[in-house]
Image (tube, helix red, strand yellow):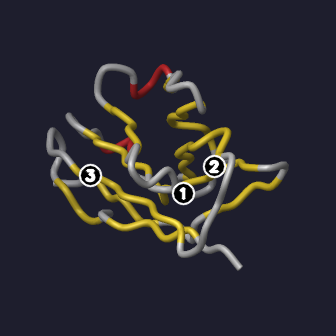
Amino acid sequence: QVHLVESGGGLVQPGGSLRLSCGASGSISSVEIMAWYRQALGKERELVALIGANGYTDYAESVKGRFTSSRDNAKNTSVFLQMNTLKPEDTAVYYCQIQAEGRTYWGQGTQVTVSS
């Protein structure tokens, strides 16, 4: 059974940076989409960033220019989210997601809190 595990969350001051990592505990082949979502308290889960199998990337308008998602090409089940110039409104639980072979895998989430 495959599990995704995120790491790298924490407390950071406004304007600071964090790098989230996500890796799979087992083998996943034919990865189609690697994505990051977030869910703030009392709000719905929203897409933050995605990487397609061909390297295509897309970002939510609210994070464009500040967040960058990348993947480990040597290990196609690892994905990263570099978050710069963080704002209080970025506070949320961040989840990674992998879509492959008709299945969707989710991580357990990692808390990111942006506060002074």
Question: Residue 43: which disc?
Answer: 2
Q: 10 Å neighbourhood of mark 2: few (<14), some, or many (≥20)?
A: few
Please give left or right for residue 101 compared with residue 41 in the image.
right
Mark 1 element type: strand
Depth check, mark 2 against mark 3: the one in front is 3
Residue marked by disc 3? 19
**Residue 12's x, y, as percent?**
19, 56
- Residue at point 38%, 38% (across, down): 70
Check disc 3 and give the amino acid type. Answer: Arg
Q: Circle 1 sits on which residue?
A: 95
For marks 2 and 3 on the same chain, the one whose residue lies earlier in the sequence: 3
What residue lies at 57% left-to-right and 52% top-to-bottom?
39
Identify the image quadrant of residue 88: top left
**Element type at marker 3?**
strand
Which residue is pictured at 46% across the width and 64% down the height?
Answer: 23
Could you say where residue 11 lies in the image, as x and y percent from the top left? Answer: 24, 63
Q: Three-letter amino acid code at disc 2? A: Lys
Q: Which mark is residue 7?
A: none
The 10 Å Cα crowd at callout 3, few under 14, some 14 to 19, many 20 or more, is some
